[in-house]
Amino acid sequence: MSLEASPAKMPLFGATLAIIFRWYNRELAILSRQKYISAIILILVCTTSLFATLAVREAHDLQNYMGYVAENGKSALFHEESINQNIATRLSREFYRRIADAPPDDTERAAICQHLETEGGIYGFNLLKKNRNNLDGTLQTRNRSCNEWGGDIGALSVIHTAERAAQSKYSFSNYTGYRFRNIRYYIDLTHNYIYINQPVNTQNYTFSNWLVGNNGSINIARSTHTISIDDNALTDLLTGETTLSHIYQDGYTRNNIISMLTPVFLGDKVKGILITDINIDDLVVSFNTVDRPLLWQFLSLYVTDNGTGSHIVFHKPYIKSYALISYEDSLTQYYTLHVKLDAIYVIIANLWLLLLYLLGTWALCRYAHKQLIRQTLLSRDNVTDAMTGLYNRKVITPELEHKIRSLVDRVIPVTVIAIDSDGLKRINDSLGHHMGDKVIQMLGMALGNTIRKSDYGIRLGGDEFCLVLIDYSLNKSRDVITRAQEQLLAIDTDKLVAFSWGAYQLLPGDTLEVAMLKADELLYQHKRSKYPERK
């Protein structure tokens, strides 16, 4: 799960916040302090429940991802098993081809055997270092009769060529990115030698467990027991089935490993056994979460032998606290895989959710608190003008004055617009006061539809209005007048309403009262410019 937010969950959280906001917009109008406390409790319950739901969902997703890690690793090991079987098949085919198509050449065999090496009772090739170009690994045997097994030397190179091109172009497998560096052994039961796919200094190590012989022959039962192969598995192996060892400590690498054993046939008889060791590095390659590198830093992975209780720990978290998410899966009848994810990663992966929860809860509580203050103030006096729905003069309080001064001090532009209806007396005298009231209502409606919720639309009395625009410069305030005129075009079908206006942007040190007076002066300048006879 990368430390990044999940897009599918953001709309859910946003929609929930929107529903709660709409609920408060309706309910907070009658909020008392007791109801405010109830609202805070409701906010905490809602946001905490939502957070818990999303956190559980995230944990469930991580649990599922642990299953993906296990399945992906098992597939990689199966792929490696198929490589081992493929190499064994090619080796069987090469042994058979050399006998069927090219009978043993005594001259070639003698040329090979004249370079036979010996070291401490062990015969073979590349015993101390690589000295044969056609053989990349080391061959060890106690069978000094090179003529018996020398003919196999050419076939052993198949192990290396098959490793480099193990996957057929017709294979369904897509595990091209895995690069295992396995140690492979070929144990020849016919000629009693062991071939390792890499150079081994025989002075430092001899594969004695595979060179123990009865009358010169390798005792396969005894040798396989040294790598924890039981009798039933050995019987299956000798009848052509690939088997696995229990976990055991490898004498060569001194590490706990698992061995895959595949028989190599010559005709219908088992000629030898191809063994591939699965070590810690191979398990890391198999289970590495390449798509989530950060998660890999907090994973603990190990394999337990169900029979012996031995285990291979092949990855530890770089920082360890507590395994919050655990997953187990059976690899084979012998082994159980354990995957554990540290709590630190779960916290990191859900940090965005925690921050969103805290910020959302804080924002809702702050909103509820502001609404309480606002509604407390509104409850003292009725500040709504009954005719227009705008504020009346009572909204102009010291609190509003302080708010405006604070905004101006923070260099947030505040503009006051004074508005006065034109020709209202004429309408009252000629059409009646009811039409004059209608003019005031239409003008109030146009202004109310034009401003934002953060602005203040105030009917001062009669046909006088005042707009207090928050975060509006003087130039920008002209847009409000334009929109109001457009609103009137839509609602004033009789073309009764006309108005004059004056706008003033507050300067540092200005009070709201001063701004209203200056806007009023500009209003009457506008009137005089429209009606020269009033000068």
Image (cartoon, rainbow, N blue to C red):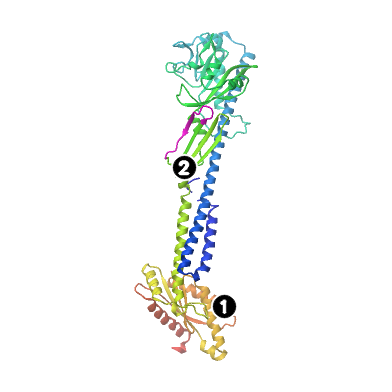
Look at the image and give the residue range highlighted in magenta: 304-319
Rendered image: mark on residue 121: none
Please determine whether, in this image, residue 24 is positioned above or below residue 156.
below
Mark 2 lies on a secondary structure that is helix
Does residue 134 show up?
no
Residue that numbered label 2 is attached to: 294
Which residue matches tag 1? 489
Residue 78 in picture, x, y percent from top left? 58, 31
Write the residue at 46% across / 21% down.
252
In the image, 172 versus 247, the foreground residue is 247
- Give the x, y percent position of residue 516: 41, 79
Q: Could you tell me if residue 282 is visible in this image?
A: yes
User: Are the residues tagged 1 and 2 within 8 Å (C-beta)?
Assistant: no
For the residue marked with disc 1, what is the amino acid?
Answer: Leu
* SS at mark 1 in the image: helix
Closest to the observer, 250 or 471:
250
